[in-house]
Image (tube, grey):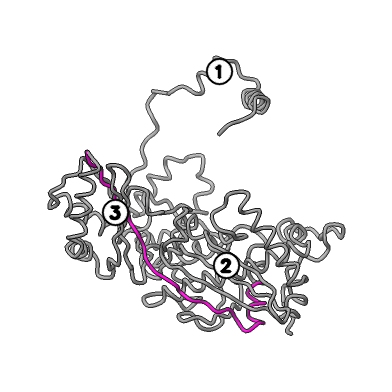
Amino acid sequence: MSATHDGARKHLLNITAGLEPADIAFRLSAKMHPSAPRVPGATQTDPGVIDKRWALLPQATGVRDEVADALTLERHELFARNIENFIGTVKIPVGLAGPLRINGIAAQGDYYVPLATTEAALVASYHRGASVITLAGGCTTLVLSEGVGRAPAFAFHSLLEAGNFVQWCVANTEKVREKAEATTRFGKLKDVRFTVEGNHVYVLLEFTTGDAAGQNMVTIATEAVCDFIAAECPVKPAYFFVEGNLSGDKKASAQSFLSVRGKKVAAEVRLPRKVVERHLHTTAEKMVDYWRMSALGGVLSGTIGVQGHYANGLAALFIACGQDAACVSEAAVGVTRFEVGDEGELYASVTLPNLIVGTVGGGTGLPSQRACLDVLGLAGAGKARAFAEVCAALALAGELSIIAALSAGQFASAHERLARGRKPNQATGGDTGVEERPTRV
């Protein structure tokens, strides 16, 4: 990343203020003195090992009970497969947004959505969006596609070898499927795709994973495929890796809209004009004006997709419900669209192609996270598609609320009141735009 001459000069002067060249050289040099003790125990969670870990932190003795509280220590065995070097748990505030009415193939009814966050105004915003969706009769949701990929990569000596390798893999697809599916009760290999780059071959293996998010599932299955190929393929790769960074795992990528990672879900709603004006304090036309300008802003800044803040709601929902929070980096890719309908209503839709979510496995079985899934009525097998539809509906609620606040000039005042505890300055917009109890139409 480049910097201007003047900018670089000012930055260097700022960060080295008061330091002599020798001091800077010492601070940035390798230090070879003996290190502090290693954290002991790895996957062990019994209290004796936890005591040893806390003994490494004498400066934190006074705060230990905030992390290693009695209930956490009593339940220590529950965390053994979800964390290493365990020292306790962190408590994050959880708020409810809703009711959020969803009319989906999998999700049906009014949902109160638990959101874990430390960001004031977030729950209030999603709550407002959920409330207006419900006033309009709910949003329609649909899982459009499913699949989780892993992309092993193979290197050869020539393009000819790479081509022969692909030919062999195509001829042996059923054997590849058999080896992959032998590692899992629930995973099914649905597709195999090839990308050739010179003498490198990327093999994208796409699975369905049942009600699990499935990333560990597909990794183990892919390793079995790689071992089979290495043993049986007559065209031997010079080397290979179980993931060649083509799958899009935990990152926003341009292929998001060409395929699917996890579950691709769409949600839509039509808000009557009186609902928009009375409860969002703006008009459908102003919201579309804002959406149009923000869409162009997204294009100009090079974003992948066009949306306001999917990551806010998804991160809070993922943390509350035991999802892999790092997957928000890809799950928050998507497209929001607003239009004014023939009768002056606001049509709003969202499409999220990368929802890596599940209702079994991973963190979904931990006590608090399982409880939040129970709040939704979506814990356990058979609920993953419904949970994905809730994710999309929540994203839609968030888009409606934030764009309403921005188009009505109330975005800053809402944060001033809720995040700083101040009464909004009338000069900055007056009303917060976030209603505690939306009145009925």
User: In the figure, is residue 412 to the left or right of 268?
Assistant: right
Which numbered tag is attached to residue 395? Answer: 2
Label 2 with label 3: CB-CB less than 8 Å: no
Give the residue at x 42% y 40%: 56
Which residue in the rendered view is the most extreme toward the front?
A: 160
Q: Specify few, some or many for label 2: CA neighbours under 10 Å numbering under 14, 14-19, or 20 or more.
A: many
Q: Specify few, some or many for label 3: CA neighbours under 10 Å numbering under 14, 14-19, or 20 or more.
A: many
- Residue pointed to by mark 3: 203
Which numbered tag is attached to residue 23? Answer: 1
Residue 116 image offset from top left, x and y in percent: 55, 63
User: In the figure, is residue 312 to the left or right of 362?
Assistant: right
Task: For marks 3 and 1, give the one nearer the viewer.
Answer: 3
Question: In the rendered structure, which disc, 3 or 1, sits on the residue that comes first in sequence?
Answer: 1
Q: Which of 296 and 408 is in front in this view?
A: 296
Give the residue at x 62% y 60%: 308
> Is-magenta flag for residue 187?
no
Q: How far separated are the C-alphas under marks 3 and 1?
A: 50 Å
Residue 35 image offset from top left, x and y in percent: 39, 30
Q: How far separated are the C-alphas under marks 1 and 2?
A: 50 Å
User: In the figure, is residue 99 to the left or right of 440?
Assistant: left
Is 352 drawn above or below residue 110 in the view shown?
above
Residue 388 image offset from top left, x and y in percent: 47, 71
- In terms of secondary structure, where does tag 2 sit? helix
